Image (cartoon, grey):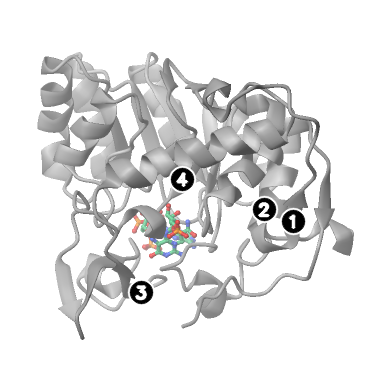
């Protein structure tokens, strides 16, 4: 890989084009992803401190994408039923162990078909994920399958060839992640470049997952080939976020922990995530509205009218990668 091709969000600036709209409100940020069209190309991370059932309902009712986490497996069947009773789409996560294969069989036998199924494991370029994709495609062919996480073009191609409808890119760039420090592997520090390489190889949509620190990083992800952007820490600090609210020295925070943290696992075994606090940010509606408005502005700077007009703008690399502010 040429060094010039290795960069992260903070290293890139997009180059403006002549504006063709009279108001930012004319810019259309919506995106088609699988069977639905969503208001913005943003999905809260499928983590226990980021999404829960009330927030999933809130998001689905307002045309935002969501992916429910997989850490209360006994709740998932009822969750799908309750979403469908409300005429809302059901979007769940699964792992790859034997009981997860049994769960897919159970859904198929009950004719319960989630609109979206995300296969969520740390190292998604594996036979275990390929087997799970194949099983879902055989038993629940109408479900849109998102597989991950991966960090290479080869992995994207292999999971797509196995039947995945979308792949999720990002090994170790997350705020609560310590994979890069504990294992030496991943896309931490060059996540945006990894999204670019993966998107060039992809024939299906890519989700850029992890490392988003500013709203402008959403536009940068779209520029480099993502169709959807998964966000954890920036969406964990809200009134609706499941983590507990804490006040320290007069400042309010919400809990945020990695899905591979000791807190999530209940034991210090194969830990690749940490627990932390994120500033409390109030109503998530305001944050999502701000993301939409900033994306409308991005589209205007791109000289376009629609989200995908961002794809073709020029860019410059302005400085070297750092570790994205993360620490162990
Ligand atoms: N995006 C990211 O960078 C990362 C995300 N995570 C998140 O943490 C959660 C837990 O992830 P995960 O531990 O994969 O889930 P699981 O504990 O469900 O593991 C899934 C399966 O994959 C195996 N496995 C996991 N990692 C590896 C590996 N490196 N090599 C070989 N086999 C492996 C596990 O076996 P065994 O446990 O016996 O090895 C298990 O059988 C998920 O939500 C995941 O998304 C975790 C780390 C990185
Ligand atoms: N290496 C780890 N990555 C994790 C863990 N839990 C979640 N994640 C990934 O992070 C993103 C969110 O990133 P953010 O920068 O927006 O906060 C999430 O979607 C997962 O892919 C973990 O324990 N270890």
Q: Is mark 4 within 8 Å of ligand 2?
A: yes
Circle number at residue 12: 1
Say which residue appears at 33% left-offset and 20% top-offset.
115
- Residue receiving disc 2: 192
Residue 256, by quadrant, is: bottom left
Query: In this rendering, which labeled residue sits more in front, label 4 or label 1?
Result: 1
What secondary structure is found at the residue carrying circle 3? loop
Asked whether residue 85 appears in the rendered view, the answer is yes
Q: Is mark 3 within 8 Å of ligand 2?
A: yes
Left or right of 169: which side holds 67? left
- Residue receiving disc 3: 274
What secondary structure is found at the residue carrying circle 4? strand
What secondary structure is found at the residue carrying circle 1? strand
Rounded to the nearest angstrom, the CA distance separating label 4 from label 1 is 19 Å
Q: Compare marks 3 and 4 and give the one earlier in the sequence.
A: 4
Left or right of 166: which side holds 268? left
Circle number at residue 230: 4
Rounded to the nearest angstrom, the CA distance separating label 2 from label 1 is 9 Å
Q: Position of residue 260 (x, y in %)?
A: 35, 65
Left or right of 312: which side holds 70? left
**Front in this rendered view, residue 85 or 97:** 85
Q: Compare marks 2 and 1 and give the one earlier in the sequence.
A: 1
Q: Are marks 3 and 4 in contact (CB under 8 Å)?
A: no
Position of residue 251 relative to residue 213, above or below, is below
Q: Compare marks 3 and 1 and give the one earlier in the sequence.
A: 1
Say which residue appears at 63% left-offset and 38% top-offset.
298
Quarter of the image where ligand 2 sits: bottom left
């Amino acid at each position: 890989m040429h060094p010039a091709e290795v960069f992260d969000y903070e290293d890139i600036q997009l180059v403006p084009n002549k504006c063709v709209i009279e108001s930012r409100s004319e810019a259309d940020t919506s995106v088609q992803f699988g069977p639905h069209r969503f208001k913005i190309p943003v999905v809260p991370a499928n983590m226990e401190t980021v999404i829960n059932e009330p927030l999933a309902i809130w998001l689905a009712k307002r045309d935002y994408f969501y992916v429910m986490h997989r850490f209360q497996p006994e709740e998932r069947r009822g969750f799908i039923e309750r979403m469908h009773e409300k005429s809302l789409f059901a979007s769940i996560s699964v792992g790859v162990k034997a009981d997860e294969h049994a769960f897919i069989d159970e859904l198929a036998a009950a004719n319960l078909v989630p609109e979206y199924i995300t296969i969520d494991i740390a190292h998604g370029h594996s036979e275990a994920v390929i087997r799970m994709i194949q099983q879902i495609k055989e038993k629940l062919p109408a479900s849109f399958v998102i597989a991950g996480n991966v960090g290479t073009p080869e992995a994207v191609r292999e999971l797509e060839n196995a039947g995945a409808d979308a792949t999720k890119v990002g090994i170790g760039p997350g705020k609560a992640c310590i994979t890069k420090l504990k294992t030496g592997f991943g896309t931490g520090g060059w996540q945006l470049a990894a999204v670019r390489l993966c998107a060039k190889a992809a024939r299906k949509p890519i989700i850029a997952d992890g490392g988003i620190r500013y709203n402008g990083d959403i536009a940068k992800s779209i520029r480099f080939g993502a169709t959807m952007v998964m966000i954890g820490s920036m969406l964990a600090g809200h009134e609706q976020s499941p983590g507990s609210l804490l006040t320290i020295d007069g400042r309010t925070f919400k809990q945020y922990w990695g899905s591979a943290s000791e807190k999530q696992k209940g034991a210090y075994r194969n830990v690749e995530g940490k627990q932390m606090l994120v500033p409390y940010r109030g109503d998530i509606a305001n944050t999502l509205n701000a993301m939409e408005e900033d994306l409308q502005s991005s589209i205007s700077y791109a000289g376009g009218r629609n989200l995908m007009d961002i794809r073709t703008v020029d860019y410059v690399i302005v400085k070297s990668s750092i570790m994205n502010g993360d620490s162990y």
